[in-house]
Amino acid sequence: MNNVHDMGGQQGYGAIPIEKDEPVFHEEWEARAMALTLAMAAWGKWNIDASRHAREKLSPRDYLNFTYYERWIAALADLMAETGLVTVEELASGKADPGKPKETPPLKPEMVSPILRKGGPSERAIESAPRFSPGQRVRTSRASPKGHTRLPFYARGRTGEVLLLHGAHVLPDSNAHFRGESPQHLYAVRFSARELWGPEAAAKDSVTLDLWESYLEPA
């Protein structure tokens, strides 16, 4: 979707700070935010793409003012309320409704490490042959979907070269909206910096994006 989160290549936001020896978490609560997000996902009420889309749907004001993990918590609260895991009143008070039955959490401490080691593989087997092959020139779609997509705004309507095929993977555009996994072939596509940013970009620079087949057409 076109929203403030898709700001790749935009100007005026200042330099990106590079922190030497940056820690995994800057504050203790950030680790708790990540743990809480993983624990609540174990209920199976949403998937990783829906979780990403929830962060995209934050208001531009909140998205720009929140830190990275503040966005996680805000999006998690939205998902929990939308799926009935909590009520807005419970979120506002910080206390569980005493009238509701206590549920048994689906994630127990001994289950955490095996689940994290397993990760979330998205590769799937499909019967259709890949439409494109390495070395082929392709052009990206110009579409501006209202929902989730992994095609950045700055790369729409641009021409690049297929570098390799990753196999078939779950299509986030469908999975984020609970319309099924709809796996498609996924390609690494290289674009010259000048194709994306114009003649002022460095001649030798390039950007490589992982793009699903429906984003592409022969160039």
Image (spheres, rainbow, N blue to C red):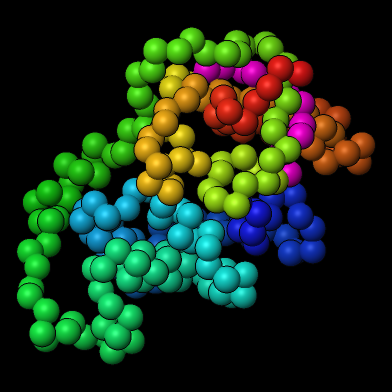
What residue span does the magenta drawing correspond to? 154-165
Where does residue 57 sit, x and y in percent of width and height?
53, 63
Residue at the spot 48% in from the left edge and 61% down from the top edge: 55
Q: Residue farthest to the front?
A: 179
Where does residue 8 sit, x and y in percent of width and height?
69, 50
Q: Nearer the viewer, residue 162 or 127?
A: 127
Quick check: can you spot residue 28?
no
Residue at the spot 62% in from the left edge and 31% down from the top edge: 215
Q: Residue farthest to the bottom?
A: 93
Q: Nearer the viewer, residue 108 or 180?
A: 180
Q: How many marks?
A: 0
Q: Nearer the viewer, residue 17 or 29?
A: 29
Whether the magenta-drawn stretch holds residue 101 is answered as no
Q: Residue farthest to the right?
A: 199
Whether the magenta-drawn stretch holds residue 156 is answered as yes
Q: Is residue 38 left or right of residue 199?
A: left
Where does residue 40 sit, x and y in percent of width and height?
25, 61
Where does residue 171 sit, x and y in percent of width and height?
46, 35
Residue at the spot 35% in from the left edge and 24% down from the top edge: 124
Q: Is residue 40 left or right of residue 172?
A: left
Residue at the spot 37% in from the left edge and 26% down from the top edge: 123
Quick check: can you spot residue 194?
yes
- Above/below status of 58 relative to 119: below
Q: Is residue 155 left or right of residue 106?
A: right
Q: Nearer the viewer, residue 150 or 100?
A: 100
- Above/below status of 192 relative to 19: above
- Above/below status of 51 relative to 99: above
> Which part of the image, by quadrant, shows the C terminus?
top right
